[in-house]
Image (tube, rainbow, N blue to C red):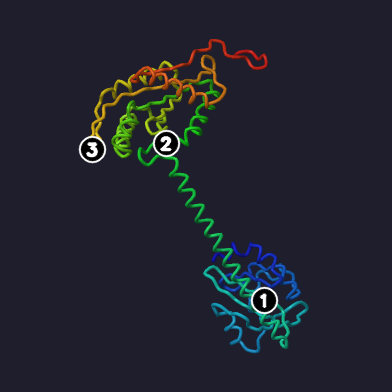
Amino acid sequence: MNLDQLARNYLFQHSRLLALRLNNKLRIVEANPGTLNTLGVPPEELVGKSLYELVIADDDEMVDRVTAASQIEGEIVRMRSSNDREVSVLMSLYRAPDGVLVFGEAVGDSDPRRKDLTLELHKRSFSLAKTIEELRNRNENLETVNQWMREKSVVDPTTGLYKRNQLDRLLRTEWERAKRHLGELSFLLISIDGLQPFRELQGADAASLIFRGVARVLETRKRLFDVLGHFDDETLFLLLPHTPLDGARELADRLRRLLENREFRAGDYPFRILLSLGLAAYHHRFYPLRSHDELIHLAADAIAEARIDGGNQVRCTQVPVLTPPVPNGAAVQ
């Protein structure tokens, strides 16, 4: 149990019981408002004092027994209160590696029922404190697991590439950078022709081997700052920062020819690679776009046309705009 955290929870701050947090040398680190009810002493006056200074005993043995125990439940002790008065306190003490927690309440020696009720309140208070701390620790552990899962969800385990759910974040970042610096950005969808029928005949595992083989080849041919990712079961995406449309078109055709008719095998099943590629681009003057999403839609339209025309080709459906729209009559930059 971490007492430093425990001391700040609702139970410690608002309990009607006296509650003291001590360090391992039994000096008071923090006292709750309930100390005023029990001892008539403001909490701030107790900070720094030793438990030895509070407990009154007829002999040193009693003090040592109270302060050396790892746990005490329901010990009647006399404590110094305001104006050097004494008060009988039903005290419970719980020791942890990083300190000591003490609960107490003033009780009359002739009131056994109240003693029993107070002791039960001590036990329940400490049990609640432990439960609160355990829940906090579990939440911290859960957050660690969630962070691990978030990191794992970024990358596709079958290819080691970015997952589809990361595309929006990646594309928006590069699109905003290109807008800010009046730069250029191209986006490419790369579909493996015939992979879906192959999947239906030979199964998902065989198709996954083909997909991973193509991804490995493409990974070796991209630039350091290009981003290759998994778009769907038969399609990859390639994000090309600082790349004009013509340059992206040349790259797309090189990749198509590089893999054209190359044979990949999934066990005993051969598969000849043909690629259909759809291309889209952003340029602040020639290819202005209202949002980064348009790059995905334009590339998807282009790849659909490539497939309809038989596949194994590069398509781009964009038409350059020589004079971009001028918002609110502002001058063209």
Q: Quadrant of the N terminus?
A: bottom right
Q: Nearer the viewer, mark 3 or mark 2?
A: 3
Label 2 or label 1, whichever comes before in sequence order: 1
Please name the residue that numbered disc 1 is placed on: 104
The Cα atoms of the two marked residues, 1 and 3, are separated by: 74 Å
Please tell me which residue is depicted at 60% across the width and 14% down the height of the picture: 325
Residue farthest right in this picture: 83
Residue farthest left in this picture: 268
Quarter of the view holding residue 98? bottom right
The Cα atoms of the two marked residues, 2 and 1, are separated by: 58 Å
Position in image of residue 122 (x %, y %): 64, 75
Please name the residue that numbered disc 2 is placed on: 162
Say which amino acid is labelled 2.
Tyr
Please name the residue that numbered disc 3 is placed on: 267
Depicted 155 relative to depicted 299: above or below: below
Label 1 or label 3, whichever comes before in sequence order: 1
* Front-lying residue, 205 or 150: 205
The answer to whether the residues at label 2 and label 1 have Cβ atoms under 8 Å apart is no
Q: Is residue 203 left or right of residue 74?
A: left
Position in image of residue 38 (x %, y %): 73, 75
